[in-house]
Image (tube, rainbow, N blue to C red):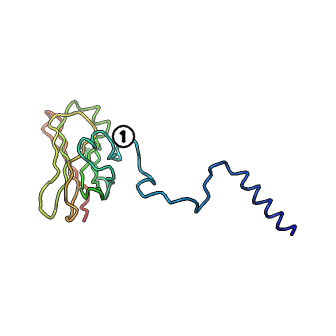
Amino acid sequence: MRSRRIVTAAIAAAFVMLPAGTALAGSGPAPAPSDRAASKSTAAAPEGNPLSAKAQAAGVCDDAYQIGKTAYMKKDAETIASVKQFYSPKCKENYGYVWLWQSFVDEEDDYLVVASVFNYGEEREVGRKVWPEDNGQEYWSDGADTVENCTSADAVVEPKNSGRSFYAETEMRC
């Protein structure tokens, strides 16, 4: 009987040490996958944020996430952009994403940017968007209904009056 009181007292003391509202392992419902690590921020980001103002203006579905590896665009030995492919399970669309690195944005006044998804099944670009003279940092293609085909994200950047184009594409995803 005495040992049961000691154990009960020890358990009660342990619960007193827990702050109010502390959840114990196994208590309460598990968070939905969309709530686990989803960012609620609307800021543009190098990682790609489907909730950013430019993503929303392009019609990117809010559940889009990166698929495949990031590709890097080079100007000589300098990295000037990251290119990524995103997929939305809810909208069943792929998107191309281009993030221009700050060093490039600071160096150039205006530039042409192209973001698209390459559809290997049809051997053509889809979701292509072109900014002929811009000076931003974040660019999203239109959504591409390509989930039945192999795809990659493609991007072109051409500094104004340079006569040089730079290109990058992500790995093919099927």
Residue 47: x percent and y percent? Answer: 35, 47
In the image, farthest residue toward the bottom: 1
Query: What residue lies at 28% left-to-right and 36% top-to-bottom?
Result: 104
Element marked by disc 1: loop
Q: Is residue 86 left or right of residue 114?
A: right
Which quadrant is home to the C terminus? bottom left
Which quadrant is home to the N terminus? bottom right
Query: What residue lies at 15% left-to-right and 64% top-to-bottom?
Result: 121
- Say if 100 sits above or below 67 in the image: above
Residue 36: x percent and y percent? Answer: 45, 54
Quadrant of residue 69 within the rendered picture: bottom left
Query: What residue lies at 23% left-to-right and 54% top-to-bottom?
Result: 153
Seen from the viewer's position, the closer of residues 86 and 101 is 86
Q: Which residue is mark 1?
A: 42
Residue 115: x percent and y percent? Answer: 20, 47
Residue 126: x percent and y percent? Answer: 15, 53
Seen from the viewer's position, the closer of residues 151 and 104 is 151
Query: What residue lies at 34% left-to-right and 40% top-to-bottom?
Result: 44
Q: Residues within 10 Å of mark 1 (few under 14, many from 20)?
A: some
